[in-house]
Image (tube, rainbow, N blue to C red):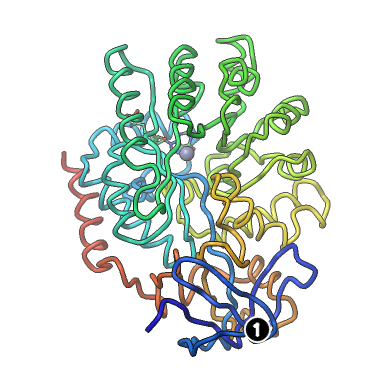
Amino acid sequence: MGTKWMIRNGKFAVPGADKPVFEGYMVIDNDLITYIGEEAPVLEEDVPVFEGNRLLFLPGLVNTHGHAAMSLLRGYGDDLALQVWLQEKMWPMEGKFTGDDVYWGTALSVLEMLKGGTTTFLDMYDHMDRVAEVAEASGIRAVLMRGVIGLCPAEVQNQKLAEAVAFAKKWHNAADGRITAMISPHSPYTCPPDYIEKFVQAAHDLDLPIHTHMSETRREVEQNEADYGLRPVAHLEKLGMFTRPSLVAHAVHLNDEEIEILARNQVGVSHNPGSNLKLASGVARVPELLKAGVTVSLGTDGAASNNNLDMFEEMRLAALIHKGVSGDPTAVPAGEALRIATEYGAKSLFLNQVGRLAPGMKADFIAIDIDQPHLLPHTDLISHTVYSASAKDVEHVWVDGKQIIKHGECLTLDEEAIRRKAQEAFEGLLNR
Ligand SMILES: N[C@@H](CCSC[C@H]1O[C@@H](n2cnc3c(=O)[nH]cnc32)[C@H](O)[C@@H]1O)C(=O)O
Ligand SMILES: [Zn+2]
């Protein structure tokens, strides 16, 4: 059998196109989509055929901010504000995480994400070699970085920076190019200015983009002004961060001038509506960001502040909360929410061959079962994807042309072992 195969009689989603859903064919050759259209493709040889009826094919979902291993702390420390949650609940437990904890927590998250239609995820954490191991073995696409909190003595700071650099060098473009790296100081409130400048320099030296948490809470913004005389956006701009391609997570508390600075510097924003609501951080100004031309994408953040990694839920939240807050029912319509979760996500992660179903793009796509009560009748399948579907509707997942989820089951990871080991890891943390 060759490397080429074809899907027929499927429905395909191309949000943003004149005809956003059509019925037809898609040809995959190795890791690439080589044809998609309503007409049958003209092929020189017979190729294996996959029957696509009752399925809607979508680009794989792109989760642009998270901490996968934090799934071990799902439900541990709910209903708290960010600073209390971080300082009193998360950091003491995370301080006990071993490489194995990170491995099993990440495996649990990657399993959840793949089964829920996420084909690319960003991860900012510690023990990143173990995260990369999971990404490599699972077949998912991953943008990985050693996140660094700099509230520590200079020697420890230097060591963490060296780890971040070594990780990026080792893993950028690894696993057939499925893994890429970024450089990531955790935030302006956990990294002193001179330390952030070192990360900017490292990103220049390695020619890599930067990712950080920014302006998540009102308190953070006020504290930044008190400490440095600037709001976080101007502060990071002054430290040179935006001289690198950048992606900031949250960006909830922005004024008009800050939106303008982000737009001018082409800084992407990873919008995390579930986490922002749960930690009572606020609601990001997504309609204004989009209007200003900022690339907005979607992230779940860690499972301990969400509390799941369902990107369908995140899409629905993004489509709903901005209507509610603005009083404008046209804010973030379904097609735009789907592009935010796919095309704009890929753009935010600097993956120019990901995020759309089109010839020449990587074959990262999913199929949802649309023959179900909550997805009928077939009035508008883009609307159903955003307003009615959930992770549980994902039937099949392919990344880089390889099938990873088949009828809801993972072909690459040992699900039963992961479920058991994750539970054991959490119990081990409680007892250490
Ligand atoms: N332990 C590392 C830093 C890990 S980066 C990832 C950190 O982000 C934290 N985190 C998770 N969600 C959020 C959020 O919403 N805002 C800020 N930090 C978060 C998380 O608890 C974790 O400590 C070091 O050695 O410096
Ligand atoms: Zn985060």
Task: Residue 128 in the image: state x and y as whole percent.
Answer: 31, 40
Residue 256: quarter of image: top right
Q: Residue at x 51, y 32 (%)?
A: 210
Q: Residues within 10 Å of mark 1 (few under 14, many from 20)?
A: some
Q: How many marks?
A: 1
Which residue occupies the foreground of this view, 36 or 138? Answer: 36
Which residue occupies the foreground of this view, 163 or 326? Answer: 163
Disc 1, SS: strand
Task: Residue 93 in the image: state x and y as whole percent.
Answer: 28, 37
The quarter of the picture where the C terminus appears is top left
Residue 224: quarter of image: top right
The quarter of the picture where the N terminus appears is bottom left
Left or right, 320 with respect to 111, comes to right
Task: Residue 50 in the image: state x and y as whole percent.
Answer: 49, 86
Which residue occupies the foreground of this view, 81 or 118? Answer: 118
Task: Residue 380 in the image: state x and y as whole percent.
Answer: 73, 76
Name the residue that disc number 1 marks: 24
Q: Residue at x 22, y 42 (%)?
A: 99
Q: Quadrant of ligand 1?
A: top left
Left or right, 336 with respect to 232, comes to right
Which residue occupies the foreground of this view, 243 or 130? Answer: 243
Please identify the residue farthest to the front as the structure is shown.
44
Where 81 falls versus 358 (above or below)?
Answer: above
The amino acid type, in three-letter code, at marker 1 is Gly
Where 383 falls versus 8 (above or below)?
Answer: above
Residue 271: quarter of image: top right
